[in-house]
Amino acid sequence: MLIFPESRKKILVTGGAGFIGGAFIRNLLMTTQMKIYCIDKMGYASDLTSVTKTISLLGDKAKDRFTFINSNIADKIALEKAIDISDPDIVVHLAAESHVDRSISNPSIFVESNIIGTFNLLQSLLNHWENLTKERKNNFRIIHISTDEVFGSLGESGYFVETSSYDPRSPYSASKASADHLVKAWFHTYNLPIIVSNCSNNFGPWQFPEKLIPTAVIKASTNKNIPIYGDGRNIRDWLFVEDHVDALQAIINKGKIGESYCIGSQNEKSNKQIVQLICKVLDKQRPDLAPHSKLIKYVSDRPGHDHRYAIKPLKISRELSWKSKSNFQECLENTVIWYLNNSTWIETVMQKSNYKGERLGLNV
Ligand code: NAD
Ligand code: TYD
């Protein structure tokens, strides 16, 4: 439950039509009375179905609390207008191009959205913040959502923590690292009240079909090969999206300005392991097609493929009392079942974005 001070009434969520932004907004609608403004350029991965469904469940009051602004944060004038309209007390900055494979094929849009977009946001918010009343100014916060990928690639041991050195290796992570540096510079130079979070790989319902978990479910359930890059030994540290939302709430409520917090729930799995777990769930759900693992196909590796990401979330646990609450196996199972039950949504978003499930990120 969010316990915002009275003076924090309006929240601006950038990238709210994306996977994590949608989960965050649904939670705000259900657990607060805040006025929510969502700015999104409605890119290929955007979809507001989950938010509109929540609003219709909650009724007219919720409808009045939600405003959608279809704008690109790389467009300075449009962004300034959105900030004027929303007049925010809190900004949660999630807008970014987010897929590593797409960053390999088309890096320029990552520079535009993730770096220029963040720069525009910082400049516009600095102007907004400087003109707030004293009380609103004191309570104002910007939460910049980054990724553990900015720290590079781990070997078999060790963990990312807040003091890990930046060592991005993909166009995506380099653009996110650049944004983090800009954000930290705006804190140190202009005192803009910013907090950074670096989280691990999220999973859950409503994630665009290009990422590993939805890809594996969708391919296997339609009797197509499940592509695993390289030897399948690359490791990711999986975080259920609702746990991430919970951590963001803790940061908004209790996070210290100028600090960064690593968010993860210590669920390290190799890609081979996670795909096999997904296949087991599918075997239970669709025994007629078992064993789904026969569909696993090792394909050529991602260029510059980071070997391992893993977060030690000690700081957020000690200082903000946050710990992930979800049971990984249960959430993975429910996520797989969600994709099985939502084939119409999958078809709609894939059609809208002209994504046909093809391999991305090889055409360097
Ligand atoms: P997503 O791709 O599902 O959603 C991102 C949203 O941002 C999209 O709706 C897109 O249209 C919007 N957007 C992109 N550029 C924009 C621009 N220039 N102007 C306005 N809107 C723009 O991504 P996600 O998984 O929800 O990720 C959200 C944030 O979390 C990103 O900043 C990402 O880097 C970060 N993150 C994600 C993960 C993950 O596993 N998904 C892990 C770590 C960090
Ligand atoms: P992804 O979901 O794209 O997230 P990220 O690149 O941000 O970690 O990929 C997760 C892991 O799965 C990564 O090591 C690449 C791998 N992968 C596959 O093996 N096959 C696939 O089809 C995809 C999309 C990813």
Image (cartoon, rainbow, N blue to C red):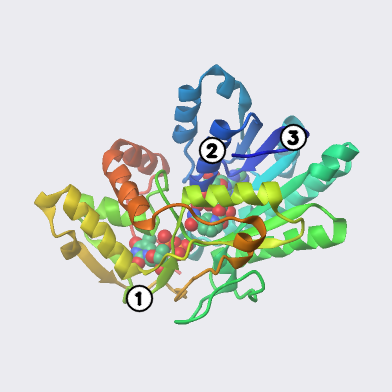
Q: Residues within 10 Å of mark 3 (few under 14, many from 20)?
A: some
x, y (%) of residue 283?
17, 54
Q: Disc 2 vs disc 3: which is toward the camera?
A: 2
For mark 3, give the secondary structure.
Answer: helix
Q: Residue drawn 41% across and 49% down?
A: 204
Q: Residue furthest top?
A: 60
> Residue 252 versus residue 128: which sits nearer the camera?
252
**Is residue 220 among what the camera can see?**
yes
* Quarter of the rendering containing residue 116: bottom right
Q: CA distance from mark 1 to mark 3?
A: 47 Å
* Quarter of the rendering containing residue 267: bottom left
Mark 2 C-beta closer than 8 Å to ligand 1: no
Residue type marked 1 = Arg
Mark 1 C-beta closer than 8 Å to ligand 2: no
Which quadrant holds the N terminus? top right
Q: Residue drawn 35% across and 76% down?
A: 233
Q: CA distance from mark 1 to mark 2?
A: 35 Å
Q: Disc 1 vs disc 3: which is toward the camera?
A: 1
Q: Is residue 37 left or right of residue 149?
A: right
Q: Which residue is mark 2?
A: 27
Q: Is residue 95 above or below residue 186?
A: above
x, y (%) of residue 103?
51, 62
x, y (%) of residue 175?
62, 63
**Is residue 94 among what the camera can see?**
no
Residue type marked 2 = Asn
Q: Residues within 10 Å of mark 2 (few under 14, many from 20)?
A: some
Q: Is residue 9 above or below residue 239?
A: above
Q: Which residue is mark 1?
A: 233
Q: Which residue is mark 3?
A: 81
